[in-house]
Amino acid sequence: MGRVLFFSNFVSSSKKRPIMIPCQHTKHVYDIIGPGRWRIDPSSTYSKKKRLGIKEILLLLIACGKVWIRSISRYDVLITSGCWTVLLLGGYSYVMKGKRKLVAASFNVPKRRHRLWRVLTRLLIRKIDIIYVHSKYDIGLINSLYGFPQSKIRFYPLVRPKPQQGKSLDEYRFSDSREYIISFGGSGRDYKTFFEAISGTDLSALVVASKRNLKGLAIPDNVKVLYNIPLEECDKLVDECKFAVFALDGSEPSCGQTCIVTSLMLGKPVICTDWVGTRDYITEGKNGLLVQIRNPVELKEKMLKLANDSDLYKTLSTGAIQWATEYTDPFKVQSHIDMTVTQVLNE
């Protein structure tokens, strides 16, 4: 039996276990730790502008140093998530790692991939024993960029806690309670194509995004825009919507998975760009529809088809629930993590 420590910069309480961490019937003992007073504020620059400021970097350095020191002598495996957290702990491990294993439960390829950044990441990533990614495409990408062995990279669909359900606040909904579709999220989004596709149709849509996503875009009359609303309220809006649409711009190889998984968990069909980060989640005609990148004509056609074809909608909704049942079952995820810990301890 091994002792395992899970660390996340966004864990605020050890009593609230992350969904991937086993809590019973396990082969190993799991503890959870957050950064305490060094926690990055989710409402700070990091969450709104999708980058770390100087303050956030300092807080993360201190938090990672804290967990690194604690894990050296007391634990056999350290599990963490988040690109920067994983890499910083890899850097600390150059000082002393010992026999302790380092597992990245969630890793997104850094956006900065050239010259010095690529060399630095290559050095830091060497100290990681297992990396989990949420897109199969990322396996080859990490290997080609940083020389990290593909045998140590594993794909598992992104998982999240059960979304909130119920009626959202009236201020977020259409005042006449009309039926709507939803598009939400910020990474790699192409709201220009979405607006072109929905403009002039009899469909109505809610868009939940950051202001940077919509800068310079003309918002159609049948679209209501919300900025940076609480996650639980966004979940409720998805729960009440007809279906979800995600147009991607191709700027990031892997993005949109959290929003896609949220929609599927709530039984909502998904229409999204046919892209490397979505093909592991959406199967054409089974739980959603795929469209070519930057093709507003095709996107409009498929939105109207799904809105007006009740048989297609029922098929895709059923497929969404089936996908979520297969891949977001907490027990299956936790059993997989428990098995991984056993494997790395036996290597």
Image (spheres, grey):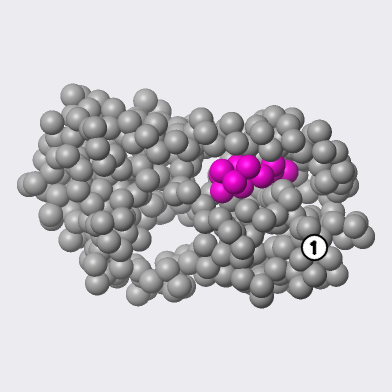
Left or right, 127 with respect to 139, comes to left
Q: Mark 1 Cα within 10 Å, few/some/many (few <14, many 20+)?
A: few
Q: What's drawn in magenta, residue-wise?
A: 260-271
Q: In terms of image quadrants, where is residue 215?
A: bottom right
Relative side of 257 to 28, left or right = right
Q: Is residue 9 above or below residue 215?
A: above
In depth, the one of 129 and 120 nearer the eye is: 129
Q: Nearer the viewer, residue 345 or 232?
A: 232
Badge 1 is on which residue?
Answer: 178
**Residue drawn 39% across the image and 31% down it:** 332
Does 88 appear above or below 2? below
In the displayed image of the protein, which residue is found farthest to the left?
73
Q: Residue at x 84, y 65 (%)?
A: 222
- Res 55 quadrant in image: bottom left
Q: Is residue 72 above or below residue 314?
A: below
Residue reaching furthest front? 166
Considering every residue shown, the one lying at the far right of the view is 200
Expressed as whole percent of the image width and height from the top left, the position of residue 205 reads: 77, 60
